[in-house]
Image: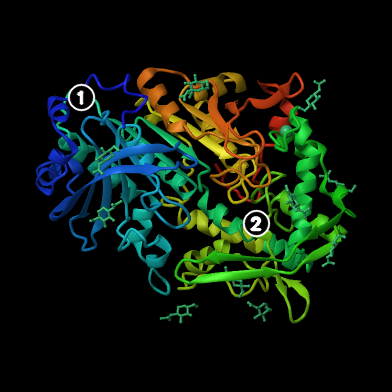
Amino acid sequence: MRSALGVLAGATTVALAQAASLADVCTTSHAKSSLPISDDIEGLEIDASSITASAVYNASTTGDYFYPAAASFDYCNVTLSYTRPGLDTPYLLEIWFPAPDDFQNRWLSTGGGGYAINAGTSSLPGGVMYGAAAGITDGGFGSFDTSADAVFLLANGTINYQTLYAFGYLAHHELSVIGKAFSRNFYGLTDTEKLYAYYQGCSEGGREPWSQIQRYADEWDGAVIGAPAIRYGQQQVNHLYPNVVEHTMGYYPPTCELEKIVNLTIAACDALDGRIDGVVARTDLCKLHYNVTSAVGAPYSCPAETTTTVLKKRGSMTNTTPAQNGTVSALGAAAAAKMLDGLKTLDGRRAYIWYQPSATFDDAATKYNYDTDTWELDITSLGGEWVARFLELRDADNLSTLENVTYDTMAEWMELGWKRYEDSLQTTWPDLSPFQSAGGKIIHVHGESDPSIPTGSSVHYHESVRQIMYPNMTFQESSDALNEWNRLYLIPGAAHCATSTTQPNGPFPQTTLKTLIEWVEGSVFPTRLNATVLSGELEGEEQQLCAWPLRPLWKNNGTVMDCVFDEASYQTWVYDFDAYKLPLY
Ligand SMILES: *[C@@H]1O[C@H](CO)[C@@H](O)[C@H](O)[C@H]1NC(C)=O
Ligand SMILES: *[C@@H]1O[C@H](CO)[C@@H](O)[C@H](O)[C@H]1NC(C)=O
Ligand SMILES: *[C@@H]1O[C@H](CO)[C@@H](O)[C@H](O)[C@H]1NC(C)=O
Ligand SMILES: *[C@@H]1O[C@H](CO)[C@@H](O)[C@H](O)[C@H]1NC(C)=O
Ligand SMILES: *[C@@H]1O[C@H](CO)[C@@H](O)[C@H](O)[C@H]1NC(C)=O
Ligand SMILES: *[C@@H]1O[C@H](CO)[C@@H](O)[C@H](O)[C@H]1NC(C)=O
Ligand SMILES: *[C@@H]1O[C@H](CO)[C@@H](O)[C@H](O)[C@H]1NC(C)=O
Ligand SMILES: *[C@@H]1O[C@H](CO)[C@@H](O)[C@H](O)[C@H]1NC(C)=O
Ligand SMILES: *[C@@H]1O[C@H](CO)[C@@H](O)[C@H](O)[C@H]1NC(C)=O
Ligand SMILES: *[C@@H]1O[C@H](CO)[C@@H](O)[C@H](O)[C@H]1NC(C)=O
Ligand SMILES: *[C@@H]1O[C@H](CO)[C@@H](O)[C@H](O)[C@H]1NC(C)=O
Ligand SMILES: [Ca+2]
């Protein structure tokens, strides 16, 4: 398909590309003759015999949170493997090359989620539809379906450092270096023709681009970064925080009780943003004005429910909850308040932060024991696997107990992971001067009701970059200077890399890569970010999100959204991590 962005590129498309059809270029012989030479790819060795190429016509997609639907597009699916000299393990790449007529001199790297370095091929249409050759890497983990955690230990106690550093940052660098050089040859670009390079991804796929931007100034012209899993040492342990709260208090809240607290929070805070639409666009005002203690005594009821979660490597897990009726208890509200406050050491020093009020309490989920008719601890393996495998270096998927685990243990685990993986997974180096000097642009987004990575995590990193890069400027000057090239937009009501079912009228910025391309190639400055309501009664409504540190505030009875600044709200996003002696960026 011809992209709506044709006007911006096109002019530079070379003779070969104009003359050739997809069938002409989508052959193993053309792919082999387009292989970059070793010098152009930092000495990596591509196995020419591994190349496959097959044309795919009339593909379509119903869209995704990060790209819209596309009725029909064609591409050449190319796969190959390469090695680093001296290492045996091959790395696999899959690249989708648009038809020559549709190619617009663009490259797009895409990433993964959880411990996966790619999201299968699900992110690739988002590049092809904008005339970009788009790729994924397997990280050298053995297959595109193998996650880093599956090959992280060579044996109990022994880290596989190739996996660690490939996952940390190297495999993505290599994907870009090979992908860009290969694309230039595949379409016959001359040395003077510009190939624009981009990245798009969310969650772990949001950590991966920061790993590159922090190290490689020239790798890309711009990146769309969603809810990044950065500050890894803290982030992964943090999933266990509500389990430790429950275990410490000896109170295991019924799932319906926490669901009711979320509903009451949304109801109480909805209007604070100036518009009654079931969306808490100002969780900061919610923090200032709503206290979960007021939920005590509210009646709740939920029907019996069976949910099945598919677990990698472990089949699936079915969780059944009975019909529930009750009233929110003082202990339930106190547990929620403690979680919302974030992790502090036993002597009260802050070690980390929690999700914003209005986010669901997924990590806090308990399980029902039908034999004893009680709610019990259900350790989340999101955090449990991190502690068992990456901190204790045991080949295990989960922790079996939280016995003897205190808030201080949590803080110690966070510091251990931070130190051990500072140069691979932590991913919070705040000096991005080389990337900025090279002209790089960043659009960073994060759901304001994210229940898996704290929204404040993105805010804190953004503010760290501002303070480190512009130490001598006023707040206003440094915010303006940062916003010229690195912009953060919080997404009202959105969950983790997605809309939320509890706030269905919230918007999502589905066309952000298009906005980034227009900024980089067309100098269209994204003062506000286009977003569309994708579900609920307001489905189809368009909104323009505010760039941090400005915050949304609806006026004229919820018909016009302004972007405003107020100091008290801002201060709710400022954290003093005094549990550590070193600064936590
Ligand atoms: C793709 O769709 C077009 C239009 O519907 C059709 O003409 C063409 O034959 C299709 N190509 C293939 C390979 O199916
Ligand atoms: C691309 O080609 C590889 C190798 O033949 C194949 O395994 C993979 O499924 C193909 N991908 C798509 C989306 O067709
Ligand atoms: C919370 O609100 C949703 C609708 O937004 C509703 O379906 C659900 O039953 C409510 N849960 C409780 C516990 O009231
Ligand atoms: C919430 O209200 C309770 C009870 O009045 C009080 O003890 C607590 O300090 C309040 N919490 C906040 C964060 O203001
Ligand atoms: C819970 O309360 C509702 C409404 O009062 C009632 O319809 C339902 O039967 C009750 N369920 C249980 C399990 O007691
Ligand atoms: C590795 O550690 C796990 C978890 O402690 C244990 O179950 C397993 O038996 C150990 N494997 C070996 C080979 O020692
Ligand atoms: C993790 O282990 C704990 C303790 O055995 C168990 O309660 C929990 O269900 C496990 N979680 C997963 C996702 O396997
Ligand atoms: C908890 O601490 C006690 C006392 O030091 C010790 O006996 C016990 O083995 C510990 N439990 C676990 C699971 O580490
Ligand atoms: C900030 O000001 C100090 C003291 O005037 C100066 O030494 C330093 O170089 C300045 N830093 C920057 C980044 O301009
Ligand atoms: C953003 O939305 C405005 C108004 O609907 C539209 O004119 C503009 O083209 C959109 N920009 C992008 C990059 O989609
Ligand atoms: C304000 O908006 C609400 C909800 O859209 C509507 O019900 C109400 O009539 C409006 N009030 C005025 C004064 O326009
Ligand atoms: Ca609202």
Quadrant of the displayed image that contains ligand 8: bottom right
Answer whether residue 471 is visible to the viewer in this image.
no
**Rendering coords of residue 452 (x, y %):** 59, 51
Of badges 2 and 1, nearer the viewer stands 1
**What residue is pinned by disc 2?**
362
Does residue 309 sit above or below 539 in this rendering? below
Q: Nearer the viewer, residue 358 or 250?
A: 358
Kind of residue sitting beneath label 2: Asp
Which residue is at the front of the view, 370 or 272? 370
The disc label shown at residue 571, or none: none
Residue 363, placed above or below residue 562: below
Q: Secondary structure at mark 1?
A: loop
Q: Position of residue 253 (x, y in %)?
A: 77, 63
Left/right of residue 221 with respect to residue 20 in the rendered view: right
Q: Quadrant of residue 464?
A: top right
Residue ID for mark 1: 13
Task: Give 467 or 357, whichever is nearer the viewer.
Answer: 357
Does residue 431 appear to the left or right of 261 in the view shown?
left
| Horizontal side of residue 394 vs 343, given as left or right | left
Q: Could you tell me residue 40's position as x and y percent?
A: 17, 39
State which tag comes first along the sequence, 2 or 1: 1
Q: How many marks?
A: 2
Using the image, determine if residue 356 lies above or below residue 89.
above
Q: Is residue 399 above or below residue 568?
A: below
What amino acid type should be assigned to the residue bearing mark 1?
Answer: Thr
Q: Which quadrant of the figure has residue 159?
A: bottom left
Q: Where does the image place residue 14, in percent across and percent down from the top left?
A: 16, 25
Local packing at callout 1 (Cα closer than 10 Å; few below 14, some 14-19, many 20+) is many
Which image quadrant is residue 98 in? Answer: top left
The residue positioned 43% from the left and 18% from the top of the image is: 524
Q: What is the secondary structure assignment of the residue under circle 2?
A: helix
Q: CA distance from mark 2 to mark 1?
A: 49 Å
